[in-house]
Image (cartoon, rainbow, N blue to C red):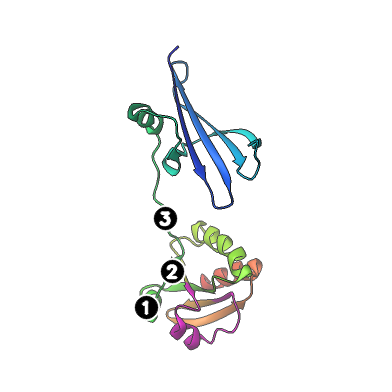
C-alpha cells in the first residue's frame, strides 16, 4: 500500500502547537486527519490531547511544518473538502445611517447594543445568533447589533445606559426593551414582535 503522509502545524497565541497529520492510503476512500496538541512550555512536548480524528481538514488553517511536503501531497490532502463562507445572521451596523436603514427596510428588528469589553455581552452573543437561525424568527425578524463605543450617536439617541441592552422595533417604532443578558426575556421579546 502506498501511503502519503502530510504534516502541518498551527501555533496559537497561547503557545499551543496543533500538529495536523494526514495519511492518504489506498484502503481509505477519504483521508484521515489526526490532530496532536502540544504545549510549547513543556520541554518534552508531551501531548495535551492524545489525538483526535477530524471530520474536515485543518490544513488550510495551518502552515506547513519544517518537513518537505510536496505540492501534490498537499493538494491531495485538501481535495474533497470545501469551506463554506460564514453567513452573518446578526448584522453589525457601523453608523447611524446604517442603523436607520435597517429600521426602515425591515418590519421587525431586534437591536443588540453591546461593548467589546462587556462580559455579559460576549456571553449572550451566541444565544442571539442561535435565535437568528431558528425557524421561528428567521426571515421574520431582522437581527442587528452595534458597538456602543463606536456608534455613539445611536447610543445616545436610544438612551443606552447598560450593556447589553436589546431594543425591539416594529414598523420603525420601539415597542420593547430588555436590559441585561436575560435569555428568557430575549425570547419573549422576540415572540412579542411576531404577535
Q: Earlier along the polypeptide chain: callout 3 or callout 1?
A: 3
Please report the bounds of the magenta region as a residue range: 146-166
Could you tell me which secondary element the residue under label 3 belongs to? loop
Front-lying residue, 105 or 83? 83
Could you tell me which secondary element the residue under label 2 belongs to? strand
Tell me the crowding category of disc 1: few under 14, some 14 to 19, or many 20 or more residues within 10 angstroms, Cα based.
some
Q: Residue at x 54, y 70 (%)?
A: 116
Q: Earlier along the polypeptide chain: callout 1 or callout 2?
A: 2
Tell me the crowding category of disc 2: few under 14, some 14 to 19, or many 20 or more residues within 10 angstroms, Cα based.
some
Q: x, y percentage for residue 126?
A: 56, 60
What numbered label is drawn on residue 104?
Answer: 1
Tell me the crowding category of disc 3: few under 14, some 14 to 19, or many 20 or more residues within 10 angstroms, Cα based.
few
Q: x, y percentage for residue 166?
A: 55, 75
Q: x, y percentage for residue 47?
A: 64, 36
- Residue 24 lies within the magenta run: no
Q: x, y percentage for residue 1?
A: 45, 11
Q: Is residue 86 left or right of residue 119?
A: left
Indicate the quadrant where residue 78 lies.
Answer: top left
What numbered label is drawn on residue 11?
Answer: none
Q: Residue at x 41, y 41 (%)?
A: 60
Q: Is residue 194 above or below residue 8?
A: below
What numbered label is drawn on residue 92?
Answer: 2
Name the residue carrying label 3. Answer: 87
Amino acid at each position: 500500500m502506498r501511503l502519503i503522509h502530510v504534516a502541518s502545524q498551527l501555533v496559537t497565541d497561547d503557545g499551543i502547537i496543533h500538529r495536523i497529520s494526514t495519511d492518504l492510503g489506498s484502503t481509505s476512500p477519504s483521508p484521515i486527519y489526526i490532530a496532536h496538541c502540544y504545549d510549547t512550555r513543556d520541554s518534552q512536548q508531551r501531548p495535551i490531547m492524545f489525538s483526535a480524528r477530524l471530520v474536515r481538514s485543518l490544513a488550510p488553517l495551518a502552515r506547513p511544518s519544517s518537513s518537505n511536503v510536496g505540492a501534490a501531497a498537499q493538494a491531495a490532502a485538501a481535495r474533497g473538502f470545501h469551506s463554506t463562507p460564514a453567513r452573518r445572521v446578526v448584522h453589525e451596523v457601523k453608523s447611524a445611517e446604517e442603523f436607520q436603514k435597517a429600521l426602515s427596510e425591515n418590519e421587525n428588528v431586534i437591536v443588540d447594543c453591546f461593548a467589546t469589553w462587556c462580559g455579559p455581552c460576549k456571553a449572550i452573543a451566541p444565544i442571539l445568533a442561535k435565535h437568528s437561525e431558528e425557524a421561528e424568527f428567521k426571515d421574520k425578524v431582522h437581527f442587528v447589533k452595534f458597538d456602543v463605543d463606536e456608534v455613539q450617536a445611536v447610543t445616545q439617541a436610544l438612551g443606552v445606559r447598560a450593556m447589553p441592552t436589546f431594543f425591539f422595533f416594529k414598523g420603525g417604532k420601539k415597542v420593547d426593551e430588555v436590559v441585561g443578558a436575560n435569555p428568557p426575556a430575549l425570547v419573549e421579546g422576540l415572540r412579542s414582535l411576531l404577535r
